[in-house]
Image (spheres, rainbow, N blue to C red):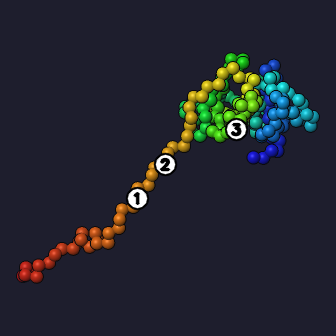
């Protein structure tokens, strides 16, 4: 996984949104992050003040209300991708659903009490990935474990018999009964 800085929008509980850059992993140190803002300064932020960190395609700075463009916060139906279907309840009372990977990063993040990464319900929106600090949540529900459909097992090939075709069209001819 690349550790180069990616575009993020940090949504704080105070309601403001900070655009900047963060690496995709290992950016939390001592329950805080160092956000590289658009002017090139490092801004230290405590995880206790952060609601979500959205990895985005564009900053959309002209949109002051919803620059993340995260319009759908729950899945309309069962997700098609593999992962853990989670429902998060924030301190503010709002809900968010997402898919967490089914690998040890989820367990490591929750054990360290830092946070977890999610894929949002609408991957075609501006938000490609979300990081939610553990301090921002009051409830975490596992709705389902989505796995790949099991593959059908191939049946063993039937034993090849060479004489089936010959027996099908072979008519015994009786030499005593000849047509006139």
Picture disc at residue 151: 2
Disc 3 vs disc 1: Cβ atoms closer than 8 Å?
Answer: no
Residue 27 appears in the figure: yes
**Nearer to me, 63 or 176:** 176
Residue in the picture at 55% in, 40% down: 147
State the residue position of label 1: 156
Picture disc at residue 105: 3
C-alpha span from label 2 to label 1:
15 Å
Residue 130 appears in the figure: no
Label 1 Cα neighbours within 10 Å, binned few <14 / some 14-19 / many ≥20: few
**Nearer to me, 176 or 61:** 176
In the rendered image of this protein, does residue 48 appear above or below residue 57? above
Disc 3 vs disc 2: Cβ atoms closer than 8 Å?
Answer: no
Q: Position of residue 57 (x, y in %)?
A: 76, 39
Name the element at disc 1.
loop
Label 2 Cα neighbours within 10 Å, binned few <14 / some 14-19 / many ≥20: few
Label 3 Cα neighbours within 10 Å, binned few <14 / some 14-19 / many ≥20: few
In the rendered image of this protein, does residue 98 appear above or below residue 158? above
Residue in the picture at 56% in, 37% down: 146
Q: Position of residue 119 (x, y in %)?
A: 67, 36
Picture disc at residue 93: none
C-alpha span from label 3 to label 2:
27 Å
Q: Position of residue 53 (x, y in %)?
A: 77, 31
Q: Residue 20 sits in which quadrant?
A: top right
Question: Reading the chain from its start, which is encountered first: label 3 or label 2?
Answer: 3
Residue depth check, mark 3 versus mark 2: number of the one nearer the observer:
3
- Residue lying farthest to the front in this orientation: 111
Name the element at disc 2.
loop
Name the element at disc 3.
helix
Question: Reading the chain from its start, which is encountered first: label 3 or label 1?
Answer: 3
Q: Residue 172 sits in which quadrant?
A: bottom left
């Amino acid at each position: 996984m690349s550790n180069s800085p990616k575009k993020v929008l940090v949504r704080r509980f105070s309601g403001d949104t900070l655009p900047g850059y963060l690496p995709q992993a290992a950016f939390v140190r001592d329950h805080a992050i160092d956000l590289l803002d658009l002017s090139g300064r490092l801004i230290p932020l405590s995880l206790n003040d952060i609601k979500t960190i959205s990895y985005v395609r564009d900053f959309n700075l002209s949109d002051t209300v919803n620059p993340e463009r995260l319009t759908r916060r729950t899945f309309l139906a069962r997700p098609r991708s593999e992962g853990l279907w989670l429902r998060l309840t924030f301190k503010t009372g709002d809900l968010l659903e997402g898919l967490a990977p089914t690998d040890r990063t989820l367990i490591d993040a929750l054990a360290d009490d830092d946070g977890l990464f999610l894929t949002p319900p609408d991957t075609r929106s501006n938000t490609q990935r979300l990081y939610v600090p553990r301090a921002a949540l009051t409830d975490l529900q596992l709705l389902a474990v989505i796995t790949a459909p099991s593959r059908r097992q191939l049946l063993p090939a039937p034993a090849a018999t060479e004489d089936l075709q010959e027996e099908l069209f072979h008519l015994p001819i009786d030499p005593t009964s000849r047509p006139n």
